Image (spheres, rainbow, N blue to C red):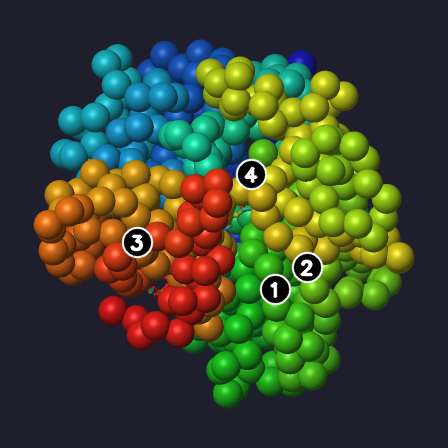
Amino acid sequence: MANHLFDPLFGRHATSNADFLTAGGASLSYSAFLGLSAQMANLFTTLGAKKGDRVALQVSKSPEALAVYAACLRCGLALLPLNTGYTIAEVDYFLSDAEPFLVICDPAKAADVAMIVPDGSRLLTLDANGKGSLTDDAAEQEDTQAPVTCGPDDLAAILYTSGTTGRSKGAMLSHDNLLSNARALAGLWRFSEDDVLLHALPIFHTHGLFVAVNVTAISGAKMLFHAGFKLERILEDLPRATVLMGVPTFYTRLLDAPCFTRQLVAHMRLFVSGSAPLQAETHERFESQTGHRILERYGMTETNMNTSNPYDGERRAGTIGFPLPGVDLRITDPETARRLPDGEIGMIEVRGPNVFKGYWRMPEKTAQEMRDDGFFITGDLGRIDDDGYLSIVGRQKDLIISGGYNIYPKEIEGLIDALPGVGESAVVGVPDADFGEAVIAAVVPAPGAQPDPAKLLEQLRPMLARFKHPRNIHLVEELPRNTMGKVQKNILRAQFSNAPAA
Ligand code: MCA
Ligand code: AMP
């Protein structure tokens, strides 16, 4: 009886007393972590969990929150991790769409979440220190559990990703999607049990949860598990780490710290960047300041990781390297789907064991983004150079990436347009030194109206996570449009790139 993902990631460490992670000065061995996850799994079973059920989790990062992931794998449940910044209005949509059998939230939000928990679902709590009804109830359970049998296609997680049209879609990720990717990355990046990963990413996204944790676990390595990215804490812990995985904002913040020196990181083995474009200038600056070349890779929620710069060969700035072992990648004409030769710019399409099983209860949306021969249409535009390195040169999807978080303008425009006094709006990303891109909105008042930008922002507050809030709202007489009537966002970006922040 095997559990396709749990066994190779965690199961084989069941009796290991080696450290799995250190958080807040306390170390947790693999066996202790697995004992905790077994207690949670036994609790889920007691509550009536059945294979295929969902568990929604909106809590601060902690070892206990991570144990929920392992507990879900043990029981064959699909984890639905949610950004802690999401408002109740946003969470309401995810819960009604995914219909989890169990919702786990921070005790401080429990009263509000209780109002939106679907009928028949249970609610448990977990705070930033790992305390709450989840761990209280789990403590009553046995700390051993026989993992449920799961095959390669069984669901391990559903991660919601916003769309360019309509509401967020739940990307269904199978045991083999995650296992194949963890194996490929651990091999390519030469992970071993001697590695110590400085983990400062959130664990509600692919990067922090699957890339970072799965690669660590499958290698028997260890994590320095930080609640978030706090520069001083990172600088303190770097001497004890061998690998850092981050979004570009991590690297620009580190470079700006006077004590981030060549000597501080001389012992480091690897710096990985992804989730957003790493500027070639940051790449070069990092090398001249530290002697290390950052390894940039490329992925998506729907596909896990697709490409990576090489470990041994040249890590080429401004590129995202080569397809991972087992991943087929091609560049096609976005209009005709015809394959394009290397050197030409077109749609990046990928196929392989990493590609998801489709969007939760949205077969038409899944079909729209898949070719008949199994290639997934990423929405990213790329080019392959003479040496085979892939670069992302643009996006066909209207997307802003701020500090590694994806923000879909369409969602914000829809909310702004519905506010009193607004005629129409356009949301774009403008360059931001810290986050790469920052959100701004151009608003055309409704005839005769004079909306106050500060008031508009105030009205958006309960509807949208803070990271999606426009940093500035500019009132304009009209939106620039092309002859087809499409808003020319490039003109707005140019117009407001140097406008002062609100
Ligand atoms: C925080 N704020 C943000 C962001 N983060 N605003 C816009 N974009 C952001 N990314 C808000 C805060 O709420 C705060 O609001 C203000 O900005 C300043 O916060 P600050 O303390 O400076 O931020 P922070 O807490 O230090 O966070 C910055 C961060 C964080 C460390 C860069 O955003 C982060 O961990 N990003 C990583 C995201 C990630 O894991 N992405 C992977 C997903 P106020 O004004 O109220 O103070 S993509 C993925 O998984 C794909 C598959 C892939 O390829 O990896
Ligand atoms: P998400 O939907 O949150 O999974 O974000 C995936 C998107 O992030 C991709 O489609 C890309 O547009 C972008 N992305 C991820 N890694 C990189 C990278 N290294 N360089 C540029 N963009 C990236």
Residue drawn where x is 64% and y is 75% of the image: 281
- Please tell me which of labels 3 and 2 falls first in the chain: 2
Q: Nearer the viewer, mark 2 or mark 1?
A: 1
Q: Nearer the viewer, residue 395 or 170?
A: 395
| Location of mark 2 (residue) | 296
Quadrant into which the N terminus falls = top right
Residue 233 location in percent, x, y?
44, 71
Relative to residue 435, is residue 302 drawn left or right?
A: right
Displayed-image quarter of ligand 1: bottom left
Q: Nearer the viewer, residue 480 or 22?
A: 480
- Amino acid of disc 2: Glu
- Amino acid of disc 1: Leu
Q: Residues within 10 Å of mark 1 (few under 14, many from 20)?
A: many
| Location of mark 4 (residue) | 301
Q: Is mark 1 within 8 Å of ligand 2?
A: yes
Secondary structure, mark 4, is: loop
Q: Residues within 10 Å of mark 3 (few under 14, many from 20)?
A: few
Label of residue 478 in the image: 3
Residue drawn where x is 38% and y is 67% of the image: 496
Q: Is mark 4 within 8 Å of ligand 2?
A: yes
Quadrant into which the C terminus falls = bottom left
- Please tell me which of labels 4 and 2 falls first in the chain: 2
Label of residue 278 in the image: 1
Q: Is mark 2 within 8 Å of ligand 2?
A: yes
In the rendered image, the vertical position of residue 410 relative to residue 322, given as above or below = above
Residue drawn where x is 74% and y is 49% of the image: 345
Residue 250 seen? yes
* Mark 2 in CB contact with mark 1 (< 8 angstroms): yes
